[in-house]
Amino acid sequence: MPTNFTEAEREAFLADKHIGVLSVAATDGRPPASVPIWYGYSPGGNIRINTVASRRKARLIEQAGAVTLVVQREELPYQYVIVEGTVVDVTKPSPDDVRETIAVRYLGEEGGREYMRSMDGDQTVLFTIRPDRWLTADFSADV
């Protein structure tokens, strides 16, 4: 039977490096868009998501103003954090330092900087999302 994370545990879990799955409502008659995504987060703060401004997910996030982010551990013990949040800021273009911080988090120093160079010229957008509701599960006791 899963238990819930404490506030500190859920924030630490979200701050760890995981690929998230972002879901946002669609307005074109299609189901909600759900996409794997890199994100930035520090305990007690907001979630930051950087993407190319012309992508469908960027347009949908701006229209909806709210998202769901699912972050999970895919090996035993299974754990997850689900965050429902409100977009509180949209910055175009994304600040280079924030983009680089997120890229380095996932690819390391060298890979992150190379990724940044590969995106030169892309129009980007940074979404800042305030966590409003949290759902968590920790199956550690079941293992």
Image (cartoon, rainbow, N blue to C red):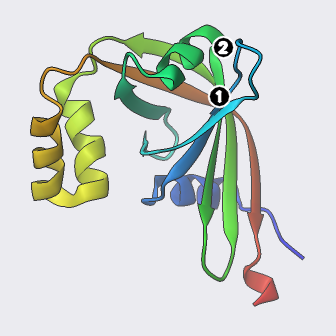
Mark 1 Cα shell of 10 Å, populated few (<14), some (14-19), many (≥20):
many
Q: Is residue 138 left or right of residue 105?
A: right
Residue 97 is situated, as x and y percent measured from the top left of the image, at 18, 32
According to the picture, the residue beneath numbered tag 1 turns out to be 67
Q: Amino acid at mark 2?
A: Ala
According to the picture, the residue beneath numbered tag 2 turns out to be 64
Q: Amino acid at mark 1?
A: Val
Residue 115 is situated, as x and y percent measured from the top left of the image, at 17, 44
Q: Could you say which is closer to the camera, residue 38 or residue 133?
A: 38
Mark 2 Cα shell of 10 Å, populated few (<14), some (14-19), many (≥20):
some
Q: Could you say which is closer to the camera, residue 16 or residue 32?
A: 32
Q: Residue at x 67, y 41 (%)?
A: 83
Q: Is residue 92 left or right of residue 67?
A: left
User: Which quarter of the rendered picture does the C terminus lie within?
Assistant: bottom right
Q: Is residue 9 left or right of residue 17?
A: right
State the image quarter where residue 4 is shown.
Answer: bottom right
Q: Residue at x 18, y 27 (%)?
A: 96
Q: Marks 1 and 2: in contact by CB < 8 Å?
A: yes
Residue 26 is situated, as x and y percent measured from the top left of the image, at 69, 19
Establish if 94 lies above or below 75. above
Q: Residue at x 9, y 37 (%)?
A: 117
Q: Secondary structure at mark 2?
A: helix
Q: Could you say which is closer to the camera, residue 28 or residue 100?
A: 28
Q: Could you say which is closer to the camera, residue 10 or residue 80?
A: 80
